[in-house]
Image (spheres, rainbow, N blue to C red):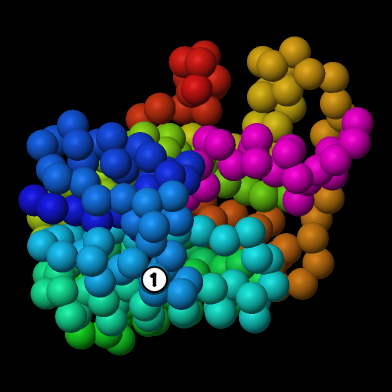
Amino acid sequence: MRIAIAGATGTVGRHVADAATGRGHDVVSLSRSTGVDVVTGSGLADALEGAQVVIDVTNTTALSARSARRFFETSTGNLLEAEERAGVSHHLALSIVGIDGIDSAYYAGKLAQERSVAGARVPYSIVRATQFHEFAAQQLAGAKGPIAFLPRLLMRPVAATEVAGYLIEVAEGGPQKRASDLVGPRDEVLADLARRLLEADGARRTVVEVPLPGRFGRGMASGALRGAKPYVEGTLTFDEWLASGR
């Protein structure tokens, strides 16, 4: 099967490409490095020629609701239009577990993306997953200085490799609309993960947990992002991921 991956060079995208190739699929990378820009639509028509499935794992650093919505609505719209013209039979979008009641900040963009996918003519699947194990490192990288102030986040992190494998399974199974959610094996707290990561790396920084205000902050601290059964559960814990060399 010819599978095009939007965001193929990102945190999860590279694992999706590896998983698809490992299962014998023909992989097409949709990224700026390959001459494709999903925000402008440049290069999409040629890249999607002959593709049966598009897996969208694109991301943005935008945190405001307006900017996040603009990115996801624009990129998703461009993908879906090009897919319809190319005869793609399955659009698969990666989203986030538990965001229905948190239509704010970045999550507003992901909800807008889901609405765009569900309202299009291309048959689709939406896979929601919890935060990746890499999320703690990303948050630490954005918190400059010897003291890292991190938001209170109750989470159930999952390995990006397991997310990738699950996405390929869904791609192979055909359009499902809302597929089962994928969550990690253990309940965790972001600040605790960050401290364990720093200890494993031999880094001397202090992590201070700070509850964020507003709907976004309350949603992160509520436990909603850990998901609710029924769901598919990953097996690799955060500590096992740390010990694996990442």
Depicted 225 relative to depicted 154: above or below = below
Depicted 151 relative to depicted 193: above or below = below
The residue at 59%/72% (across/down) is 68
Report the amino acid beneath label 1.
Ser
Q: How many marks?
A: 1
Quadrant location of residue 57? bottom left
In reply to whether residue 130 is colored magenta, the answer given is yes
In reply to whether residue 161 is colored magenta, the answer given is no
Quadrant location of residue 16? top left
Direction from residue 217 to residue 240 in the image, left or right: left
Give coordinates of residue 117: x percent, y percent: 32, 77
The magenta stretch is 128-151
Give coordinates of residue 163: x percent, y percent: 35, 43
In front here: 70 or 64? 70
Depicted 237 relative to depicted 104: above or below = above
The residue at 30%/86% (across/down) is 119
The residue at 21%/46% (across/down) is 27
Label 1 sits on residue: 42
Direction from residue 53 to residue 115 in the image, left or right: right
Direction from residue 116 to residue 49 in the image, left or right: left
* Residue 196 appears in view: yes
SS class, disc 1: loop
* Residue 94 appears in view: no
Give coordinates of residue 84: x percent, y percent: 19, 80
